[in-house]
């Protein structure tokens, strides 16, 4: 089973409910492999993975990397990095076509921002409470380890900004409406999960995946059962087979409990896609 974090397993307060923890613990005790699949970097994804104690790898950076386990010495296996010239081209496009966008870069060596205002509330580029590795023009930090370029605009949504990098050798997606994420074309939650399933000898039709955003569409369509949250983006819902309650209504726990209790159909709070 694959679980997205933000907007899916996590509530709007960025926490996992006790109800969800119990349901996931029951699943793992029954031998089900539970994998977190998130756009987050390891530094902000792994505290949740460790708290769930599922004992499985964690898909991070939208599938561009996989963390081997939940231990403090876990290995981060980077699957896809961006060519430096491609990153520079994307930065130039964004500066030209979305001139007020804030830019940030995730790499194998850290994360970098052009501005850092830790006291400012609501900035999507404040990816977590950890201070960035360095601050300055993004062009200074482009190297062979570049994993993800991010852009945020105060007025434009991610889909609008994605048009600026169209035609480049990148994948443009988002896990929040105003935060564009630019990655290697092969970086995808679906591809990372498929690779893990091959290692475990699990077929796609044995997988259930939960998600809510544009970056979850591939894994929702690929999984034997794709479950979208009631708060999901319309494209995520279109890719899914089932819609459960929202993240703030414990939609993940609701669905897991139905399975664990042996129900053969979604509860009334859920509906199947027509």
Image (cartoon, helix red, strand yellow):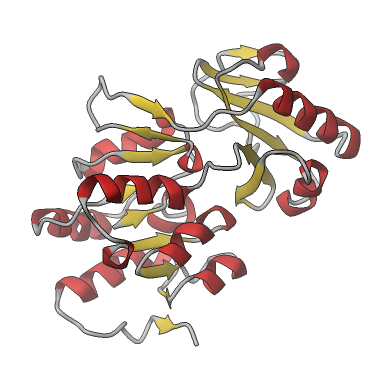
**Which residue is located at x 84 percent, y 34 percent?**
93
**Which residue is located at x 31 percent, y 45 percent?**
196
Count up the numbered dots.
0
**Viewer-nearest residue: 89 or 55:** 89
* Residue 252 appearing in the image: yes
* Residue 43, image x, y percentages: 41, 27
Instruction: Answer above or below: position of 251 versus 171.
Output: below
Q: Dividing the picture into quarters, in which one does residue 3 lie?
A: bottom left
* Residue 251, image x, y percentages: 37, 68
Query: Which quarter of the figure is the N terminus placed in?
Result: bottom left
**Viewer-nearest residue: 51 or 239:** 239
Q: Locate residue 272 relative to residue 75 in the image: left or right.
A: right
* Residue 136, image x, y percentages: 72, 13
**Which residue is located at x 60 percent, y 37 percent?**
184
Instruction: Answer above or below: position of 232 versus 195.
Output: below
* Residue 15 appearing in the image: no
């Amino acid at each position: 089973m694959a679980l997205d974090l933000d907007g899916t397993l996590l509530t709007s307060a960025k926490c996992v409910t006790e109800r969800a923890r119990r349901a996931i613990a029951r699943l793992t005790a029954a031998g089900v492999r539970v994998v977190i699949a998130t756009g987050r970097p390891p530094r902000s994804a792994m505290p949740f993975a460790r708290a769930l104690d599922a004992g499985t790898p964690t898909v991070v950076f939208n599938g561009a990397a996989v963390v081997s386990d939940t231990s403090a010495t876990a290995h981060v296996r980077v699957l896809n990095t961006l060519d430096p010239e491609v990153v520079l081209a994307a930065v130039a496009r964004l500066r030209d076509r979305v001139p007020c966008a804030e830019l940030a870069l995730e790499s194998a060596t850290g994360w970098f921002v052009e501005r850092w205002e830790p006291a400012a509330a609501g900035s999507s580029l404040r990816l977590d409470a950890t201070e960035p590795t360095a601050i300055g023009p993004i062009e200074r930090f482009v190297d062979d380890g570049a994993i993800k370029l991010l852009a945020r605009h105060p007025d434009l949504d991610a889909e609008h900004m994605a048009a600026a990098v169209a035609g480049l050798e990148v994948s443009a997606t988002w896990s929040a409406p105003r935060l564009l994420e630019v990655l290697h074309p092969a970086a995808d939650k679906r591809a990372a999960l498929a690779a893990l399933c091959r290692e475990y000898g699990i077929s796609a039709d044995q997988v259930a995946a939960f998600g809510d955003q544009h970056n979850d569409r591939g894994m929702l369509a690929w999984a034997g059962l794709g479950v979208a949250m009631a708060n999901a983006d319309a494209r995520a819902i279109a890719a899914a087979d089932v819609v459960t309650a929202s993240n703030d209504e414990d939609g993940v726990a609701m669905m897991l409990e139905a399975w664990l209790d042996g129900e053969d159909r979604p509860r009334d709070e859920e509906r199947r896609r027509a």
